Amino acid sequence: MKAIVLEGPDKPLVFKEVDKPTLAPGEALVQIKAAALNRRDYWITVGKYAGIKYPTILGSDGAGVVVEVGDKADRHWIGQEVIINPGYGWGENDNFQSDDFKILGLPADGTFAEYVKVQARHLHHKPAHLDWEHAAAIPLAALTTYRALFTKGKAKKGDKVLITGVGGGTGVFALQLAKAAGCHVFVTSGSGDKIERARQLGASAGVNYKAQDWAEQLLQLAGGFDVIIDSALGDGFAKLPDLCNPGGRIVIFGGTAGNIPPLNGRKIFWRQLQIIGTMMGSPDDFKAMLELVNKHKIIPVIDEVFPLANADKAVKKMENSSQFGKIVLRA
Ligand SMILES: NC(=O)c1ccc[n+]([C@@H]2O[C@H](COP(=O)([O-])OP(=O)(O)OC[C@H]3O[C@@H](n4cnc5c(N)ncnc54)[C@H](OP(=O)(O)O)[C@@H]3O)[C@@H](O)[C@H]2O)c1
């Protein structure tokens, strides 16, 4: 089969022939119709990710058709149109993942290939209202933002929610999921054009995080926030506690812009704020996320679709965050 392979540090991604996977009991072979990128794929190609091994077939997000299974008990999956939950080995505790937690696409070979071997219990039916490209865009980003918003952030109808850096794959999903749940959503972005696009998707308002007074502008527009979803960290994070309503929750799952700067701890305890870490999501989060996507017929926002063979160009596009929404590969 053909696959996109990362062969070593500082080596370009290559589109090459590799062995088709063989199955063990409990596994399934999915013929990939479309795959999608996450910033994780970019971090791995530039060597900034823990546990990188070579060669690796990247890709955590995929949609396709099940063509083989390793167990008779899973035969009902054959011919089914599926998406894959890429979070393996979550474990027993809903509050955090186990030490065995792994993400499809490193260490196990991922979805940037004609076929991917997955654990059958990670298969889910493709939402019927979505084509292959839009279905492939869902798994990792929607799972992460679902858990950040609802399982950890406890966002509910009527809450004011701030999504920082809305333009990314997770940012746009966070906006769509929060709107579906009846929240009032405000955004930040480094681009006025992306703020406008976020408004078209239902954001109440947005400000540019490059403006000196972006936090003051937000306070004027929104008052304060019950939940803030942030995957940037960096210098701007210092302002987030000021933007919270009393009891507000700041949920974090990435550090695109750096680390957490010094914070005024007194503001955090006096106003009983919470800074909460989260990581992708549990199997229950995945099911609940899919239910929300199906119920509200959410259509993921795709920035651009590249042929699988051009995955290198697709990953390159992530370098300067010019995308709005997900970057997708068509197999
Ligand atoms: N822990 C987990 O489970 C998990 C899961 C998914 C993602 N992540 C992490 O979360 C982050 C986002 O992932 P992604 O896939 O959405 O990445 P992405 O598509 O590359 O988006 C990154 C976005 O970050 C925003 N940004 C950049 N600098 C910023 C700043 N100074 N302040 C605020 N926003 C800024 C940009 O928004 P604008 O374009 O609007 O300016 C950009 O579009 C990454 O660091 C990723 O590794 C973690």
Image (tube, rainbow, N blue to C red):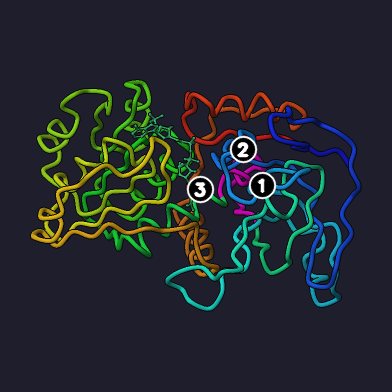
Give how far across and how far down residue 59 sits, in percent.
67, 44
Does 156 appear above or below 327? below
According to the picture, the residue beneath numbered tag 3 turns out to be 141
Which stretch is magenta? 126-138
According to the picture, the residue beneath numbered tag 1 turns out to be 52
Task: Kindly identify the residue that appears in the image at 12 percent across and 38 percent down.
Answer: 219
Task: Kindly identify the residue that appears in the image at 66 percent across and 54 percent down.
Answer: 104
Q: Mark 2 or mark 1, which has the lower sequence index?
A: 2
Q: Mark 2 or mark 3, which has the lower sequence index?
A: 2
Q: Residue 116 carries which label?
A: none
Magenta includes 291?
A: no
- Type of amino acid under label 2: Gly
Task: Kindly identify the residue that appears in the image at 83 percent across and 72 percent down.
Answer: 25
Magenta includes 133?
A: yes
Give how far across and how far down residue 6 sits, in percent.
74, 37
Q: Is mark 3 within 8 Å of ligand 1?
A: yes
Task: Kindly identify the residue that appears in the image at 41 percent across and 42 percent down.
Answer: 255
Give how far across and how far down residue 71 sits, in percent.
84, 74
